[in-house]
Amino acid sequence: MSTSAKITTTKYDSFKDLRTGKYEWRVPARKLNLWRGHTKTGEPFKSFNLLLLDNKRSRIHAFVPREIDAAVEPCLEVGTIYLFKNFTVREYKKEDRFRCIHKTIQIVFSRDTKIQELDETQVLIDKAAFDFYDIGDLKQLSQHTTYLTDVIGVVEEIELYLNDVRTRLGYMQIQMKFHLTDGRQSVKVTLWDELAELLDVTLKEDLEYPIIIIIGCGRVTEWQNKVEISNVEATTFYINYAHHSVTQMRKMLKQPEFAEYQKSFNMRSPPKLYTIEEIKNLGNDSIETEVRIEQLTKEETWWYVVCTSCYNVVKKIDKAYNCLKCPRDVPHSHIWYKLLILASDETGTIDILLGNLPSQKWIGKKAQDIVNEDSEECWPDMLKSIEKKDYTVKLVIKLENIKHKSPIYSAKDIIEGHNFEYPIKQCQESYAEASGSTYHSDSMSETN
């Protein structure tokens, strides 16, 4: 049987036709997202939520109760197509908040639900789907907490960096702030904690500028009479995603309303370079400095192991790696760089912490590859060879450097040599792969 025959001859149901009172549904769908809610103390529920997309471009929110979570979760991979059979259609309760789609129903799995993986050739389903609200229409959504929404826009800021903030309750949190514009209006976006850190990691990749971001399932609020988008557990993001909406916005950048905005990128000037002595007296900022790397600090290992879902550090328990954040066993964990280097210039010395992506870009190899090649060597020759050379480093001065006088500064980028040119990235008709969070959660209660 040909591929086209497989696609056209099999009869399926669609999420758009769901109704209560029927149980024997057969819907092929792509898994777009998975997230968990949390207790007031921050503990994740065992039950979890799914966002699914079928072959009729209809999305649905699925709830998986804790009784079957251990059996269902290992069977599902983000982006894969499955045939879902036998599930209950349930109306949302009036008090259910932060619904990931604008519908009055959700589906609930049970022990009788059957899940069968399908090949991409068996049914045609889009890689993603969104229900966008114009930035100018977000005001009405900020007045209630019933629905989350999808928003697309061009990032106004040229540089983005993380902030450490103390909440009104005294907790320390990580945030990233930026503005999205559609050429007519703009909206402030504030992402918190894991999602902010994941965006920070993603932005260090070699991206096309200006950056176009899709915020999926964002929470719209109002603060001091201004609309703002923030994240809840279900929120995700897509950067320069291969979607027709991104293509259309990229074309809009050529229109007059974006003229002044485009000029800010084309007129970008080389950043000011600071000495080490000046850095130690600066405020919260992202700056560049020219230094000489004296040595790699060898008091601890240069790599660590992270979870493939949430990118938190995993612990080895009984010969297996375990993520306490997800929580789950991680059989195929990632090995990431963590380099602490001592750098100097004519005014002094400074300790610099270089994370995974800047290190990988700098060295030209993944940490995993070096570990595989030099399993017997604690500090491979490749790493030793970077000492006693001149580099230009982009540093982020964080709250702990200012208030708590932390002597260790984080690096966003590092390039060998001094006095290099600063290229300007131009818009091109090409698209990076989606960089979406694989660690998501929502507000569906444990009893749903």
Image (tube, grey):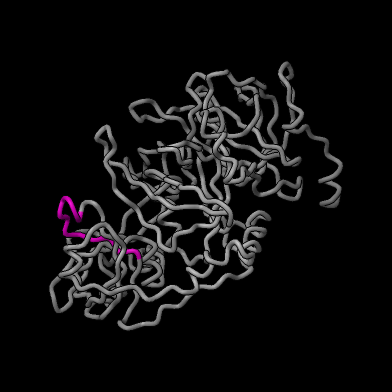
Does residue 302 show up? no
Which residue: 25% across, 65% down?
Answer: 378
Figure quadrant of residue 299: bottom left
User: Looking at this view, is 203 or 270 the one in front?
Assistant: 270
Left or right placement of residue 79 versus residue 309 in this view: right
Q: Is residue 355 magenta?
A: no
Left or right placement of residue 205 versus residue 59 in this view: left
Q: In the image, residue 145 lies at what x, y percent?
A: 51, 29
Figure quadrant of residue 314: top left
Which residue: 40% across, 55% down?
Answer: 200
Identify the magenta region.
401-412
Q: In the image, residue 319 lies at what x, y percent?
A: 34, 44
Residue positioned most to the top: 21
Figure quadrant of residue 287: bottom left
Left or right placement of residue 392 versus residue 51 in this view: left
Q: Note whether 73 is above or below 277 in the view shown.
A: above
Q: Is residue 404 magenta?
A: yes
Which residue: 23% across, 64% down?
Answer: 352
Q: Note whether 114 is above or below 162 in the view shown.
A: above
Q: In the image, residue 240 lies at what x, y percent?
A: 57, 59
Which residue: 70% across, 36% down?
Answer: 83
Left or right placement of residue 298 versus residue 128 in this view: left
